[in-house]
Amino acid sequence: MPDIECVAPMQTILGEGPIWNDREEALYWIDAWQPLILRYRPADARVDTWKLPDALNVEPIGSLVFREQGGL
């Protein structure tokens, strides 16, 4: 059985929807209740976060996808 290790100890309320970005070699996920988009880059162990604007706060964010031309 593989070893499991926490590489990004974030204090998310509801972290979900992990998705790997091959171009960036980074893991993205969301926190539906804060609401945040988070990105972890294994190459430098960096975690970036983006707070979503209140205008998008009508419904909790549930997931994200990458556009073929770049962006989310």
Image (cartoon, grey):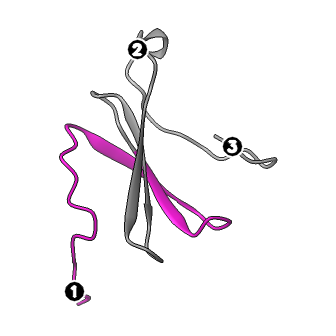
Instruction: Answer few, some or many: residues within 10 Å of disc 3's Cα (few below 14, many 20 plus, some between 14 and 19).
Output: few
Tell me which numbered mark, 2 or 3, is placed earlier along the sequence.
2
Q: Do the CB atoms of the residues marked 1 and 3 lie less than 8 Å apart?
A: no
* Residue 17 at x, y percent in the picture: 41, 47
Q: Which mark is residue 3?
A: 1
Tell me which numbered mark, 1 or 2, is placed earlier along the sequence.
1
Q: Which residues are magenta?
A: 1-29
* Residue 49 at x, y percent in the picture: 40, 44
Q: Which mark is residue 12?
A: none
Task: Examine the rendered structure and indicate whether residue 3 appears above or below residue 7.
Answer: below
Of the two numbered discs 1 and 3 in the rendering, the one whose residue sits closer to the viewer? 3
Which residue type carries mark 1? Asp
Which residue type carries mark 2? Asn
Q: Reply yes or no: does residue 22 show up in magenta.
A: yes
Q: In the image, what residue occupies the spot 64% across and 68% down?
A: 22
Q: In the image, what residue occupies the spot 20% across and 60% down?
A: 9
Q: In the image, what residue occupies the spot 39% across and 64% down?
A: 46
Q: Residue furthest right?
A: 69
Could you tell me which secondary element the residue under label 3 belongs to? loop
Which residue type carries mark 3? Gly
Q: Which mark is residue 71?
A: 3
Q: Quadrant of residue 14?
A: top left
Residue marked by disc 2? 57
Q: CA distance from mark 2 to mark 3?
A: 20 Å
Instruction: Answer few, some or many: residues within 10 Å of disc 1's Cα (few below 14, many 20 plus, some between 14 and 19).
Output: few
Of the two numbered discs 1 and 2 in the rendering, the one whose residue sits closer to the viewer? 2
Closer to the camera in the image, 37 or 45: 45
Q: Do the CB atoms of the residues marked 2 and 3 lie less than 8 Å apart?
A: no
Closer to the camera in the image, 21 or 50: 50
* Residue 72 at x, y percent in the picture: 63, 40
Dominant SS in magenta: loop
Q: Do the CB atoms of the residues marked 1 and 2 lie less than 8 Å apart?
A: no
